[in-house]
Amino acid sequence: EVTSTVYGTVILPKILDQIVACRDPLAQAYLMDCMIQVFPDEFHIQTLEVILGVCPRLREKVNIRTILQGIMDRFSTYYADELLLNDEEDTEGVKMSVMLDTFEMFEDCIASVLEAKAAKVTAREVIRLESSLLDFSLKCYPGRMDHVNKCLGVCASGLRAVAPNIAAEAGRPMPIQLDGIAVSELEKLLSLPLESLALRVLELDHYSELLTFLPTNNRKLVAVGMLKAVESSGATPMDSNQIEQLFSIIKPLLYEDRTDSGMGLTSNNPSENLTNNIDFVQHQTLIAKLLHTLYHEDTDLHYDMLCVARKHLPLHDRTCSSYTAPPLIYAALKLLSRIRLIEFPMAPSLVQACEDDGGVVQNDNIADFGRKIAGSNESETIAEQEENAEETIGMATKANNADKIEDCIDESITYLKKEDEGENSFNKEDETEEGHDGSSIDKVIRENTDELEGGKVDNLNVTPEKEADVKHKEELKKIADEEKDEAMLKADLFDPSPEQSPVFSKNINCRKIFLFIQKALTVLKMSCPNLCLSLTLHAAATADNCATIASQNGENKDDLNSITNEFMTQALLLYESEISDSKCQPQAITSIVGTLVSFRSLEKKEYETLITKTTQYAARLLKKPDQCKMVLLCSHLFFKGEEDGAYQNPQRVLECLQRALKIADACTATSPTNLQLFVDILDQYIYFYERDNPIITDRFISGLIALINEHIGNIGAQSATITNAKSQFYKIIEYVEEKKTQTNSAKRFQLVVC
C-alpha cells in the first residue's frame, strides 16, 4: 500500500529527478502537471516544500504560474470540501496540515522564481503570479490582511522593477506602458479582495499605488467594484480619513468624460451612447447610495465626513449634481435631526404632550396635506385633522367685516389686499369672459340667501345681547387665565427639581447644518429646479420644526425663524424664475401650501407676506381650472386651526372662496364638465363652516347648493366627469343631512337649506 510516507521518501524524489533531468520545457511542464493531478491532495500537502523546491530548477520557458496555480486550486478545493464535510476522522493529520503555512511556502517559491528570472520576467507574469497567490490566500486564509499586503507589495515592487519609466504623481494616474493583458490582470488583482474585504482594502499599504498603474477606464471598473462591495457588505466609512481614501479610489466615477449634449455621450454611435448613458446613471446611483450610508456617532465627525464628501463631489457639474446633491442634502437633514435632539432636547412633559397631540408636523408628510385638500372627494377628508376643535371666535364680528361680506356677494369676487400696499393680491384680470358676464352666479346666490335688501346684504345680525354674551365669555376666560398663571407660578416656586435641558457642547449646531444645506441647494437649482424646490421646502419645514421646539424649551427662536423665512423666500423665488411648466406649477403650489400650513413658529408679519405671495402665484396660473383649485387651496393658509397662536383671518378665507367661485362659474359656462369645481368649492365652504369660521354662514352654503342644483338640471349630455361630480355632490348633501341629526352640530346645520 502506498502511503504518504512512501510517496514522499521513495516515489516523489525519483519523479522529480526525472523531470529535472529532462531538458525539454514542454516535457517538464507536462510531467509536473501529471504528477499534480494524479496523486491525492493529502500527499501533496505533506510534500509541498519538496515540490516547490523544484520549480526554480526548471527550464526558463516552463510556465511556473500554471504549475503553482494547479497546486493552489487543488488545495483550495480540498480545503473547501473538508470544511463542507466537517467529519471527525482525520487520517494522518491531513486536515491539520492544510492549515500549516502553505502561504509562506508559495510566497518563497514565487520569490525564488522571480529572482532566478529577474532579467526576463514580464509585468504580466508578475501580476499573474501574485493574483494566483492572493486568490489562494483569500480562499484558505480569509481575513489575513498581512497576506494581502504581501501580495500587493511584491506586485508593486515587481512593476516598479519591470517598468522603471512608469511614474505616478500623488493622487494622479499617469499614462503607463503596460500592455492590455497586463492591465487586465492588474485590474483582476485589485478586484479580488473587494468582495471579502470591502472598505478594509483602504487599510492596505500598496492598493492605491497599484491603482495608479491602471488607465482611467480600468480604474472606473475597480471603483464600481468597490462601491458594490461596500453596498453589499453594509460597511460604512468610520472617519474622514477613510472618506478621503475612498473618494480617491472612486474619483474616475466622479469626473467622467462626457460631452455637453447629454449624460455620458462620448460617441456618434447611438447604441454606444445609450450604453454610456446607462453606465453613467448606474455609477452616479452607486455614489448616491454611498452618501446615504455616511454616519458617525459623534455629530461633529459626521459633519466632517459630509464636508469631505462635498469637497470631492463635482457639484458644479449640472448633470452629476442632479444625482449626488440630493442624497448629500438628505444626509445633512438626517444629521440635523440628531443635532436638534441634542441642541434642543424636549422636556419629558413636552414629549408626552406631543405624543398626545400628534407632535410637530413631520417633514416627510408636509406636501401631502396640500394634496389631500386639493384632491379630496369628501369633506371628511379635510375635516378629520381638527375634528374636535372648540369655538374660539364668536359671531360678534366687526362692522367692517360685514361690509366686506356685502361687497363679496354683490361682486362675487373680492381681491386680496396687500398688507403694506393698496394693490390687489390677485392679478387684475378682465372680469368678463367671452360669452359670459358672470351674472348667473350673482343671481342664483342672491335668490337663495333671502337676505337681500336693494341688492345689498345685511350684516351678521350682531345684537347687543350677543355682544354682552361675548364680553361675558371674555371675562370668564381672562379670570381662568389668571388662575392658570398663578398656579404655574406656584409650581415653579415650590418645585424642588425643575426640568433643565443639558448644555449643548458640540461645535456643529443646527445653524451650520442649514448653511451646509443652503450651499448644496444653490448648486442644485441650476440642474433640477423641481427637486430643488421640494428640498428647499423640506429644509424650511425642518427649520420651523427646530424653532418650534426651541420655543417650547424657552430658548430664542429668532435665528431659526430667519432661516425658515430665508428658505421659504428662496423657494418662492425659485418657483417664479424656474418653474415655468404649466403642468408642474399646480403641484409646486400644492407643496408650498402644505409647507406653509405646517409652520408653527414664524412671526405673523413674515407669515402673511409668504401666504399672500403664494396666493398671488395661484391666481396667475395659465389654466382657469388650475387657478380655481389652487386659490381654493390657498384659503387654508388663512385659517390654520383653533389651537393657541394659530393664524386666522376669516375674511381672507371668504375672499379666496369667492375668487374660486367666480373662476369656477366662468369655467362652467365654457364647459359643463367643470361642474366638479363647484362641488370642490362647496366642500371647502362646509369645511370652514364646520370649523366655526365666523364669516362663512349658512347663507353661502345654501346659495351654492342651489346653484349646483341649477347647473345639474341644465346639463344635457352626461360624461364620466359629470357623473363623478354629481356623485360627490350627493355625498356632501348626505353628510350635511347627517350633521343635522347629530346633537353637537344639529343647531348649526339645521340652517343650511339643501
Image: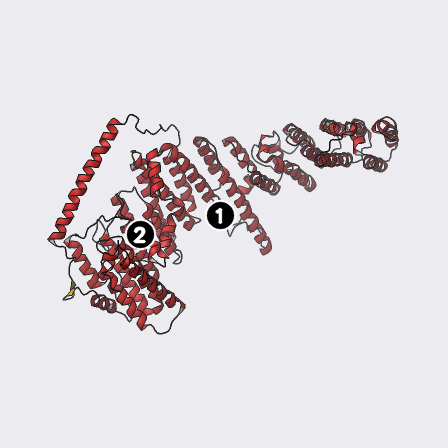
**Residue that mark 2 sits on:** 614
**Residue that mark 1 sits on:** 319
Q: Is there any visible trace of residue 326 in the rendered image?
A: yes
Residue visible at 88% across and 33% down in the picture: 22
On the picture, is 248 further left or further right than 348?
right
Label 2 neighbour load within 10 Å: few <14, some 14-19, many 20+: many
* Quadrant for the N terminus in the image: top right
- From the image, state whether disc 2 or disc 1 is nearer to you: 2
Between 645 and 542, the one lying in front of the other is 645
Q: Amino acid at mark 2?
A: Thr
Residue visible at 42% across and 41% down in the picture: 520
Query: Residue 543, percent across and down?
Result: 35, 40
Q: Is there any visible trace of residue 696 in the rendered image?
A: no
Considering only vertical position in the picture, is 589 above or below 308?
A: below
Query: Residue 175, percent across and down?
Result: 62, 38
- Identify the residue at the far left of this view: 464
* Quadrant for the C terminus in the image: bottom left
Between 734 and 343, the one lying in front of the other is 734
Label placed on residue 467 = none
Considering only vertical position in the picture, is 363 above or below 655?
A: above
Query: Residue 111, percent across and down?
Result: 73, 28
Label 1 neighbour load within 10 Å: few <14, some 14-19, many 20+: many
Q: Report helix, strand or loop for mark 2.
A: helix
Q: How far, Cα to Cα, is label 2 from label 1?
A: 30 Å
Considering only vertical position in the picture, is 446 above or below 258?
A: below
On the picture, is 202 further left or further right than 329?
right
On the picture, is 648 further left or further right than 53?
left
Q: Amino acid at mark 1?
A: Thr
Residue visible at 23% across and 30% down in the picture: 490
Q: Quadrant of residue 102?
A: top right
* Pointer 2 or 1: first along the chain: 1
